Image (cartoon, rainbow, N blue to C red):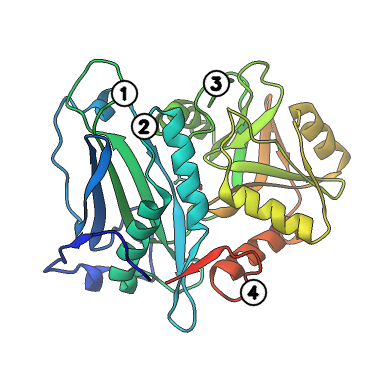
Amino acid sequence: MTETLDIQITETQSSKLSEIDFDNLAFGKTFSDHMFVADYKNGEWTDLRITPYQNLSISPANATLHYAQSIFEGLKAHKNDNGDILIFRPEANAKRLIKSAERMCMPPVPEELFMEAIESLVSLDKDWVPNKPGTSLYIRPFQFADDPFIGVRPSETYKFMVLTGPVGGYYSEPVKVKIEKHFTRAVRGGVGAAKTAGNYAASLYPAKQAQSQGYHQLVWTDGQTHEFIEESGTMNIMFVINDTLITPPTSDSILPGITRESALILAKDWGLNVEERPIKIDEVIEAIEKGSLTEAFGIGTAATVSHIAVIGYEGTDYELPTIETRKTSNRLLDALTGIKMGQIEDKYGWIKKI
Ligand code: COI
């Protein structure tokens, strides 16, 4: 790695690595020894540093706590059989963070800063990258307003930080989802295409209602008519109907998922029929009833592919074909996992090796 930015590194004196049970990793509970921090003030990113993982001290008037001017990314690193660390499409995450920042009225984190923060942090904590099947190092870059001010206006100061932590699977089983006709994750003209904190906060109450009815997650529909499918839980959604892979097009209410885009590139390269187009609930239900819907799945960084086993709609639970019969989603899962782990040739230049 050629380092061009000056990052001050303070290493921990008490690594927690030996306390971690790498055979039983949950998602999002364990954090590696170090974190990256940069401050934005007077119009520039300064004081780039890697420190031991630790709590922050912030003002009770911190603008993020009050108005959620806060954005994040999620990406993964794997260790291949030679011990190299492979990070999946970090440049795409860097670009999306810049897009989210623009929408949320925040200064961009330059791609070079994003990349060097991640590479330096992951190199320092390389022993935290697990190598068992189904595990990875989850990397969480995030940026938030830092002004101690409770007037409503864009903050003048920000922090850009990166945490990492070894993780296991996000969902342990195929999911049962309910099509949501009342609540909305994101609206036209809103912030649904930005990876911003408030979108996830807004999803909690409706998701909790669905969970109390026995579902794992919701399928979100458009905020205007509730007739069109948008996303599933915290992921993009795809269907296979009549052997065609169909997913809603990205819009200002749908997140441009990097795993979504990778899957579409793979499927097109394999010569599959792929359609990015609005998809009505009615079309999905009709296709289930006719038997022409053979697969439905969420697709995102955390779970990669999350098979949907049951779709609940207007009081009926529709059982979908068994997971073993699902050719496209299983092939996508194997290909994406294989590329990420360095077992399948990376002909798209998606892997950053460090
Ligand atoms: C993803 O899977 O891409 C996510 O963003 C999930 C994360 C919110 C845990």
| Camera-side mark, 2 or 3 | 2
Q: Quadrant of residue 270?
A: bottom right
Q: Which residue is labeled 3 in the image?
A: 183
Q: Earlier in the sequence, mark 4 or mark 2?
A: 2
Seen in the image, is 284 located left or right of residue 79? right
Q: Amino acid at mark 4?
A: Glu
Q: Nearer the viewer, residue 274 or 326?
A: 274
Q: Which residue is labeled 1 in the image?
A: 154
Q: Nearer the viewer, residue 283 or 94?
A: 94
Cα gap from disc 1 to disc 2, whole angstroms: 7 Å
Q: Which residue is labeled 2 in the image?
A: 106
The residue sitting at 49% across, 31% down in the picture is: 207
Seen in the image, is 41 located left or right of residue 263? left
Q: Which residue is labeled 4 in the image?
A: 345
| Camera-side mark, 4 or 3 | 4
Question: Which secondary structure, mark 2?
Answer: loop
Q: Earlier in the sequence, mark 2 or mark 3?
A: 2
Q: Nearer the viewer, residue 108 or 169?
A: 108
| Camera-side mark, 4 or 1 | 1
Q: Mark 2 touching mark 3, by CB under 8 A? A: no
Q: Amino acid at mark 2?
A: Met
The crowd level at tag 4 (other Cα within 10 Å; few <14, some 14-19, many 20+) is few
Cα gap from disc 3 to disc 1, whole angstroms: 28 Å
